[in-house]
Image (cartoon, helix red, strand yellow):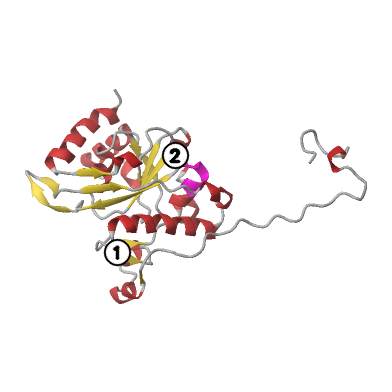
Amino acid sequence: MSWYEFFKVPFRAFARVGYGARAVGEDNIPASGPVILAGNHIGAADTFVMPALIKRKVTFPAKAEMFTGAGGPVNKLIAWFLKAVGQVPLDRSGGRASADGLGPILEVLEEGGVAGIFPEGTRSPDGRLYKGKTGVARLALASGAPVIPVASRNSQFTGKKLGIPWADHPVITYGKPLDFSAFAWGVNDRAVLRWVTDEIMAAIQQLTGQVYVDAYATSIKYGGMTEEEAQRRTKSRPGGGPAPLPPVAPDEPTAPDGADAGTDPEAAPGEAS
């Protein structure tokens, strides 16, 4: 028995019996093969209630600082636990560092596993849904894995019982799979990554009914954006534009009259058309 399986038993029992948590739509998650669970993030309980309620093992990227164990015995215990249950570190500084940091999660998908991700990158500061970061789209296009939109409700801590942070009857809803394999050609195209991300966030919003703000949660969470500006950026849904089209291939050169392109002596074996 792995450490993940060892800890999942009490976590699942605690989520169901203690918190009164329940799952809706678990049948939408394929029983095998790579899957991405992409959810909103409104409370700290999301990170363990969401995976606790389903049968398959879920690997989450957690902020890299949590794996160092720096800052005392509690942090060392957290670092050990994250490593023991197979979670992976993620550099959240942005740019190329964050993109490269997705490698361990991509490996999980390539091995047929389940990856969990919160595209907003941080907990919502006020219960609204914020703009998703494109890492989720990069994972989907690079792996070909279906994306399951996930909605968390009532996962905020409302107080403590016996010193334990308490959530009141969380509900986790797993939506229908989204297939973006037709856009694999755009894995390095910013416009494609943004469109796919917005479609995933729109599917999440359909499940949650949250108000959508077209700005990153960190911009308001850490004081860079006023509430007035956030209100101006409120939209009915993320994205909404037409699906991007693949680049048009240049016209194929035509063979001279009377020539047989299929017997071109310069063509490599197997490449003749």
Q: Mark 1 points at which residue?
A: 221
* Sequence-wise first label, 2 or 1: 2
* Residue 187, image x, y percentages: 54, 50
The magenta span reads 138-145
Look at the image and tell me in which quarter the N terminus lies: top left
Which label is found at residue 104? 2
Q: Is residue 139 left or right of residue 230?
A: right
Residue 150: give x, y in percent of width and height. 32, 49
Q: Is residue 222 visible?
A: no
Q: Is residue 173 above or below residue 212?
A: above
**Is disc 1 placed on a helix, strand or loop?**
helix
Q: Main secondary structure of the magenta part?
A: helix
Q: Distance between the residues labelled 2 and 1?
A: 28 Å
Q: How crowded is mark 2: few (under 14 residues within 10 Å), some or many (20 or more)?
A: some
- Does residue 98 show up magenta in the picture? no
Nearest the viewer among 11 and 199 is 199
> Which residue corresponds to the image point at 41% horizontal and 35% vertical from the top-left?
113
In the rendered image, residue 266, in percent from the top left (x then y), is placed at 86, 39
Residue ranking furthest to the right? 258
User: Callout 2, which amino acid?
Assistant: Pro
| Label 2: which secondary element | helix
Viewed as shown, does residue 94 lie left or right of 13? right
The answer to whether any part of residue 165 appears in the image is: yes
Residue 70's quadrant in the figure? top left
